[in-house]
Amino acid sequence: MKANKPIIAIVGLGMIGASIGLALKKAGGNFEIVGHDREPSASGKAKKLNAVDRTSWNLINATEEADLIVLALPVSGIESTLKAMAPYLKPGCLVMDTCAVKRPVLKWAEEILPDTVSFVGGDPIVQLVPSTPGQSGLDLASADLLQNAIFCLCPLARTKPEAVQLAAELVSALGAHPYFLDAAEHDGLVAGVEHLPLVLSAVLMGTVSRSPAWREMRKVAGDTFLRATELPAGGAAALRSTSLSNVDNLVRWIDELVQRLLDFRASALAGNEDALEALFGDAIENRDQWVRDKARGFAGEDLPPPTEVPSYWRTMFGFGGGLWRRREEEKDIGKDKKKRR
């Protein structure tokens, strides 16, 4: 039966998938959000949170009439999901993903999806939300999780320009900044700043916790150790899949890090105060500059702002009362203030 409203399907209702649903609801529009997750409890919880309008236990039922599909899954689940959906997808629909690795995902999309379907790879760079024992990723979902986040977009070469524009407008509807780059470039960049820190956190925790002195050490471990060993919600399997899917870039950064650690070791053993102070000084300066740049949204750099004219989005999914209307109201208020002056 044909739907009265355009359908957005979200496959995977963890932190990212549910947050996308919540953000779309907040932005508003003339569409229906259908959720699917292999875990019935996740589907039920997402519905209670109002992240989706309805859920379907069957992947095909959830996606076959969808105009836009977001695969909020770990990379290990993408290939099988694409294979299951491909024969039933609606011609003209746009499929996106949110995986932290892009090369294998785009390869599968190119091989599996029919030419009648468009694909744009995505990777939202969100603030780490550490979980507490017993919490799932869904517990950490928020309509504002993606607000002002960088959202990497890597279209297939054959993806039509209007589909690419629609993907950018979706990102803007979420309150994030679309950032276009090549899949290989993406994987090389995030290996150093996203994947390597996760490896370091896990290795540090594993190294210290295996020490015979851990029982006493854990009593004096403070905020420094807490922040250094934080890992995101999602589980060990997802982290394993991400690491192995980008292993060439990850190993290159590990080799670089090992060399830097050896240099630090040599300087420390030699009592080289100048070298150690320079290392810490450079790290503090570079991090402080990055934090300042991040806070101002990397203004003036090659990064487009959220799309201001939602042409394709407005046509397909309705203007709604959300993000763009609020921006127009803010502009009108600004104009009124200038007139009063």
Image: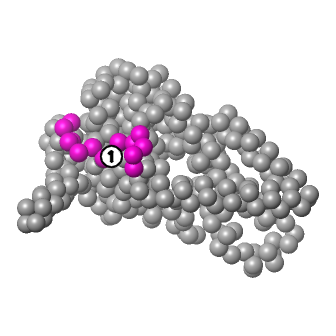
Is 141 covered by the magenta stretch? no
x then y, percent, for residue 196: 65, 48
- Amino acid type, residue under disc 1 in the picture: Pro
Q: Position of residue 26 (x, y in %)?
A: 26, 58
Seen as rendered, the residue at the extreme right is: 270
Q: Can I make out residue 321 in this image? A: no
- Taking the spot 85% from the left edge, 72% from the top edge, the residue there is 213
Q: Residue, x 52% and y 43% (percent of image)?
A: 100
Residue for point 45% across, 28% down: 109
Which quadrant of the view contains residue 226? bottom right
Classified by dominant secondary structure, the portion drawn in magenta counts as loop
Circle 1 is placed at which residue position? 305
Name the side, left or right, on which 80 lies relative to 193: left
* Numbered-mark total: 1
34 relative to 86, above or below: below
Give the residues in magenta.
299-312
Q: Nearer the viewer, residue 130 or 333?
A: 333
Camera sees residue 176 = yes
Q: Nearer the viewer, residue 233 or 175?
A: 175
Q: Is residue 94 left or right of residue 224?
A: left
Q: In the image, residue 88 lies at what x, y percent?
A: 33, 29
Q: Quadrant of the C terminus?
A: bottom left
- 194 shown above or below 83: below
Q: Secondary structure at mark 1?
A: loop
Identify whether 114 is placed above or below 49: above
Q: Is residue 300 magenta?
A: yes
Q: Where in the figure is residue 45, as x and y percent of width and height?
A: 38, 62
| The N terminus sits in image quarter | top left
Q: Is residue 250 above or below residue 23?
A: above
